[in-house]
């Protein structure tokens, strides 16, 4: 595992924490992103929070996979 892998895993895990934190704390400043604002206006804050939480869980899974050494080999 090289520095680039550690950097990307750390970045994914930090973004995961931010995303899950945004879903938990429900502050308006987190929901000003265009895509999340579109979901918020169309389907409501509750579903926007679910989307934020799911994105965080996916990013956390990605960070953990990178830290474990998994890579897409293509074959």
Image (cartoon, rainbow, N blue to C red):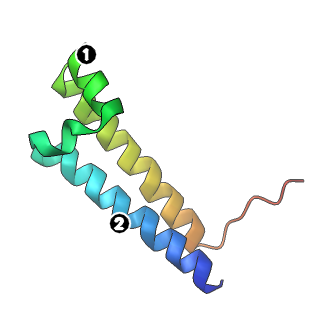
Drawn side of residue 39 relative to residue 31, left or right: right
Q: Nearer the viewer, residue 25 or 31?
A: 31
Dot 1: what SS? helix
Q: Residue furthest bottom?
A: 2
Residue 31, how many percent across, how many down? Answer: 20, 38
Residue at figure coordinates x 60%, y 76% from the top left: 5
Residue 52, how many percent across, how many down? Answer: 31, 40
Q: How many marks?
A: 2
Drawn side of residue 56 relative to residue 43, left or right: right
Q: Is residue 62 above or below residue 68?
A: above
Dot 2: what SS? helix
- Neighbor class of circle 2 (other Cα within 10 Å; few <14, some 14-19, many 20+) is some
Q: Residue furthest top?
A: 42
Q: Nearer the viewer, residue 7 or 71?
A: 7
Residue at figure coordinates x 65%, y 85% from the top left: 2
CA gap, disc 1 to disc 2?
27 Å
Residue 30, how many percent across, how many down? Answer: 19, 45
Drawn side of residue 10 relative to residue 69, left or right: left
Q: Nearer the viewer, residue 64 or 14?
A: 14
Residue 19, how many percent across, how many down? Answer: 29, 50
- Neighbor class of circle 1 (other Cα within 10 Å; few <14, some 14-19, many 20+) is few
Q: In the figure, residue 11 lies in which quadrant?
A: bottom left
* Residue annotated with mark 2: 14
Checking the image for residue 75, the label placed there is none
* Residue annotated with mark 1: 43
Which image quarter is the N terminus in? bottom right
Of label 1 and label 2, which has the lower sequence position? 2
Drawn side of residue 66 relative to residue 39, left or right: right
Residue at figure coordinates x 39%, y 43% from the top left: 55
Tag 1 and tag 2, C-beta contact below 8 Å: no
């Amino acid at each position: 595992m090289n520095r680039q892998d550690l950097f990307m895993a750390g970045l994914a895990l930090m973004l995961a924490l931010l995303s899950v934190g945004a879903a938990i704390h429900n502050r308006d400043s987190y929901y000003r992103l265009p895509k999340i604002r579109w979901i918020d206006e169309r389907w409501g804050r509750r579903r926007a929070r679910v989307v934020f939480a799911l994105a965080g869980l996916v990013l956390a899974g990605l960070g953990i996979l990178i830290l474990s050494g998994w890579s897409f080999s293509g074959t």
